[in-house]
Image (spheres, rainbow, N blue to C red):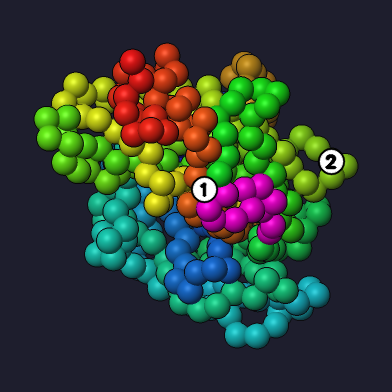
Amino acid sequence: MKLPYSIVAALLLTLFAGCKQDFDITADYKEIPVVYGLLNQQDNVHYIRLQKGYLIDGDARVAAGVTDSVYYPDTLTVKLIPYFNGSPSGSAFTLNRVDGDALGLPKASGTFANSPNILYRFTGALDNTKTYRLEVTNKSNGYKFKSKKNEDSVDITLVKDFQINSPFKAGLAIGLQSEPSAFKVVWRGAENSGVYDLTVRFHYLEFKQSDNSLYRDTFVDIPFLRSYIPSSTTSDLYTVPLTSDLVLGYLANNVKSDIEVIRQFNILKGMQFNFAAGGSELKKFMESQQAQGGLASNEALPTYTNIEGGVGLLSSRYFKQIDSVLLKPEGIDSLACSSITRALKFKNRNGVLCQ
């Protein structure tokens, strides 16, 4: 599940911004590990990011671009230990230090050094009946840090599979309408989760207007929900409307109008509904970020962390999708004829442009 900002960056910058001025500059160095990882039982290869906080005499943001400032050398012993009913259960996973660049996993550019992209990786199947604990030892100085128990969970629980009620199958045709008649997306909350993303991948074709030949088979991803935390506490069935304004408005703002191109909704691929459920720890992190809004610097609350001996977030996630959701004929007409998207020149249900 992608977040609006780099969590590692946010944690480090929050750490810097929250420092008081009455510190002792001659104090001994204190190691501050930073952890970020989202486990997924659907994967067989798993990655966790381990970095470090640092203190320098100068601009911390400049130092953030220096690899040695943010990454540990090859001195960490990293293990993920499975637990069942509070006791170790089965063999621990040992994580290896790898360069994401060499594995086709480049880090996005930004404040912090992005190459090499140091990650810690292990291979194996996770068991959703168990919980997991991260334990790390720095062999150079014996410093240890780990994921910690929270008030309502022991270690890290895995987000489990969940049911999507609407749209419930491929080939289903839906309309494009405004409230209160808009199509309703409905799903049952995933066990051990608390925050959701939903992206609707909208497939369409482009033709050259000069000879009507196929120019491109393409798509646009519509971010329907981002870091959505359901407000209901009495039911685990969640419902949100997919309004015509959202779909048409996003297309109008993100698909470039071109007088040489005619477009058509792709009735073979339709729309793909991509759900992501994030773990309860991720929910707490997002809630702590939201709670900061509107606070003055001297009122800032501590950022949520579930790392003992460091800062950061270790949680879990689960992905699910419904493919080939179609538009009803009147929905195709709305796409073609609405004042919002008419300039994009989509064909209507009869295969012609609206006049």
User: Who's the residue at 39% across and 61% down the image?
Assistant: 119
Residue type (three-letter) at the residue carrying disc 1: Val
Q: Is residue 164 magenta?
A: yes
Q: Residue at x 68, y 27 (%)?
A: 181
Residue 37, image x, y percentages: 52, 57
Nearer the observer, 125 or 99: 125
Does any portion of residue 214 appear in the rendered image?
A: yes
Name the residue carrying label 1.
325
Left or right of 218 on screen, residue 248: right
Q: Residue at image x 61%, y 22%?
A: 178
In terms of secondary structure, where does tag 2 sit? loop
Q: Amino acid at mark 2?
A: Thr
* Other residues around mark 2 within 10 Å, as few (<14) / some (14–19) / many (≥20): few
Q: Earlier in the sequence, mark 2 or mark 1?
A: 2
**Which of the two residues, 97 or 105, is positioned nearer the viewer here?**
105
Residue 253: x %, y % from top left: 37, 22
Q: Are marks 2 and 1 in contact (CB under 8 Å)?
A: no
**188 or 145: nearer the viewer:** 188
Q: Position of residue 348 (x, y in %)?
A: 39, 29
Span colored in magenta: 162-172
